[in-house]
């Protein structure tokens, strides 16, 4: 089978990753082998030129059925609300109280039934309209929801560290319950270590017995792992 035929197979999946500083996609076959991958390093937000999106996604290889498309949206502002306290009517007002008002962005929510919670976050309105038109059946997930779904499914007692560009996400599980979800701005490895140790102290986690699971991605390097291991006995790399 030719490369062109492989790229246009109905069994292919499209994964789109959107972060504050870039957007990327990967086309994979039914064996999860990546056939095509591209990244565009531009700021993503309400002011982003949608013409750039249209050009970036205007390729025959990306004419994939919406049910085979996954969109992962990474943002630093979100709220995790217990199901019994959630109100769709008031969620935008509550979000603005916590994070401030924002023009040209709309508050969205994602139900997390296994956690008994609702995750709310903002999306640029024009970007949301673009993807809904191009991939109307596509599933969109916030990166925090994805972490909870993929990494914390076994609910083991541990602290989880997800390192992004200038941001870290810390999630803590204790006795099968989610105790903390928070994100912090960092500039150095020392900043990262400070926030992790502060969480251990605030939640009274023992650095000798409570594991730190570091989710491996392109923002993690060996120097950071070595620094964390100076203070926390059990540091494990998780893919």
Image: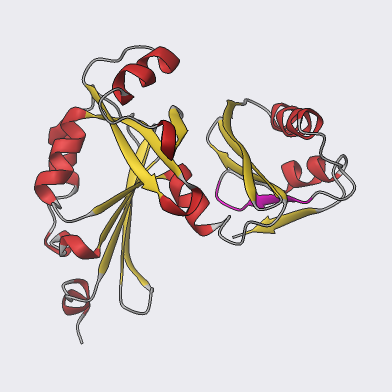
Q: Give residue 227's quadrant in the image.
A: top right
Inspect the magenta stretch and tell me whether residue 215 lies in it: yes
| Residue 230 at x, y percent in the picture | 88, 41
Q: Give residue 74's quadrant in the image.
A: top left
Q: Residue at 47% x, 46% y: name it.
A: 116
Farthest bottom residue in view = 1
Work out whether residue 40 can be spotted. no
Q: Residue at 18% x, 40% y: name it.
A: 53
* Image position of 185 (left or right of 126): right
Magenta-tinted stretch: 211-218
Out of 14 and 137, give the one closest to the viewer: 137
Can you say which quadrant of the picture contains the C terminus? bottom right
| Residue 215 at x, y percent in the picture | 61, 51
Q: Residue at 36% x, 46% y: name it.
A: 111
Whether 185 is drawn above or below 139: the answer is above
Inspect the magenta stretch and tell me whether residue 9 lies in it: no
| Residue 10 at x, y percent in the picture | 16, 75
């Amino acid at each position: 089978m030719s490369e062109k035929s492989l790229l246009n197979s109905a069994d292919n999946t499209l994964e789109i990753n959107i972060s504050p500083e870039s957007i990327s996609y990967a086309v994979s076959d039914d064996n999860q082998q990546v056939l095509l991958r591209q990244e565009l390093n531009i700021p993503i937000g309400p002011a982003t030129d949608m013409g750039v999106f249209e050009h970036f996604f205007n390729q025959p290889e990306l004419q994939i059925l919406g049910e085979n498309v996954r969109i992962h949206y990474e943002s630093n502002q979100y709220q995790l609300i217990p199901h019994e306290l959630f109100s769709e009517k008031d969620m935008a007002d509550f979000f603005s109280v916590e994070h401030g008002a924002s023009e040209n962005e709309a508050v969205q929510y994602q139900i997390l039934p296994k956690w008994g919670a609702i995750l709310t976050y903002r999306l640029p309105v024009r970007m949301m309209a673009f993807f809904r038109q191009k991939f109307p059946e596509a599933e969109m997930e916030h990166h925090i929801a994805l972490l909870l779904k993929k990494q914390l499914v076994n609910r083991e007692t541990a602290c989880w560290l997800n390192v992004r560009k200038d941001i870290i996400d810390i999630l803590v599980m204790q006795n099968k319950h989610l105790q903390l979800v928070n994100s912090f701005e960092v500039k150095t490895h020392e900043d990262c270590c400070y926030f992790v140790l502060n969480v251990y102290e605030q939640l009274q986690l023992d650095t000798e017995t409570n594991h730190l699971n570091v989710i491996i991605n392109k923002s993690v390097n060996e120097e950071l792992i070595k620094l964390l291991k100076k203070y926390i006995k059990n540091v494990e790399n998780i893919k």
